[in-house]
Amino acid sequence: MIDNDPISANRRSWDKANRQFNVIKGDFAESIVNGYCAIPGAILRGLDIGPATNVLHLCCNDGTEACYLSFSKNCKVTGVDFSSSAIEFAQELSTKLNLDSEFVHAEVMEYLTSVESLQDIDLIFLSMGTLKWILNIDAFFEAIRRKVSKRCSILVWDFHPLLECFNQEGIYCYDYPIFDNGYWRDQGVYGYKINAESYEMPARRKFENPPKNYINDRPVYISCWSLGKLFSSALDNGFCVSSFEEMNFLFGEKYRDWMIETEPGVFSHKSDNPVIPMSMKIVLSVKC
Ligand SMILES: C[S@@+](CC[C@H](N)C(=O)[O-])C[C@H]1O[C@@H](n2cnc3c(N)ncnc32)[C@H](O)[C@@H]1O
């Protein structure tokens, strides 16, 4: 069946991916208790997150980062994701860790437009690989701004859009910005969590015959926001940029063959000439 609606196509693709990812996951709760770090210190630095902080993690996937945050900072986190298999995993993880967190199964725009209020939220968090699934960035920022109070900030930690300009050999060969809109991809959500070589998970289940054949034939619709579009959209919709940091590394993921592990879990280019921005941290505040 061909699904022409990008949101339902993406949901179908993510549901299929997450069901297969869940099969290989080990005990994430135990790993978090034993010190697994899901969000690098550099990302949380400068943010005052503690027991009184109310965090909303949008597109939270299986809740690893949300639960890690709630566990390590003792804060309340609400996670939202439209993939049922991801949300089920997140709820179980939260229960095992006995956290003051909740997970909502909802499409992000439906959630933002239907939730009564977000006045109690201090921080909205978007983590690695989320921006590309936000299909209308203007509507996204506008919906948030309508509901939040003036004290709310948005923390975006994601792939740097410039990374997409480098080919598999690490050579700059696509002009920036590549897209400012979206495109359909026949291949569904990639099996990034399946591959132990490239993706670090808190824990993996041990198998005598590990499942190998990840195939996702459910197409996806993907956005690729340039920095110009991202910032102008935030500014046009009532936010200001409090900070913007570009990092020459990826945390927990060897996204391209040419990346090398420079320290445990940290992946970079083998040469620092020129320095390639790979991930970024943006903090947005409500414009007063
Ligand atoms: C790459 S993950 C980001 C979270 C985390 N960094 C990770 O890698 O697990 C992207 C998540 O966005 C969710 N997602 C994509 N489009 C969505 C939408 N329209 N509404 C809600 N969730 C969505 C997917 O289900 C997926 O769990």
Image (tube, rainbow, N blue to C red):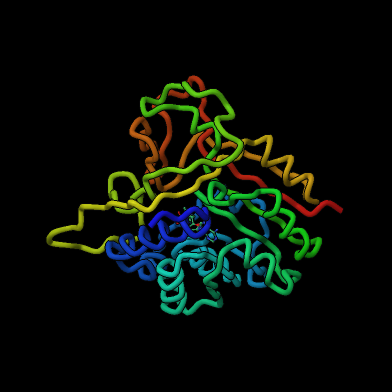
- Horizontal relation, residue 285 to residue 35: left or right: right
- Horizontal relation, residue 124 to residue 86: left or right: right
Picture residue at 62% right of the left edge, 66% below the top: 110
The residue lying toward the viewer, choosing from 123 and 262, is 123
Picture residue at 37% right of the left edge, 35% below the top: 256
Q: Position of residue 90 (x, y in %)?
A: 45, 70
**Viewport quadrant of the N terminus:** bottom left
Picture residue at 12% right of the left edge, 61% below the top: 208
Q: Position of residue 66 (x, y in %)?
A: 52, 64
Q: Position of residue 97 (x, y in %)?
A: 44, 76
Q: Residue furthest front?
A: 1
Q: Position of residue 25 (x, y in %)?
A: 31, 63
Picture residue at 64% right of the left edge, 63% below the top: 49
- Horizontal relation, residue 190 to residue 196: left or right: right
The residue lying toward the viewer, choosing from 55 and 162, is 162
Q: Residue furthest right?
A: 288
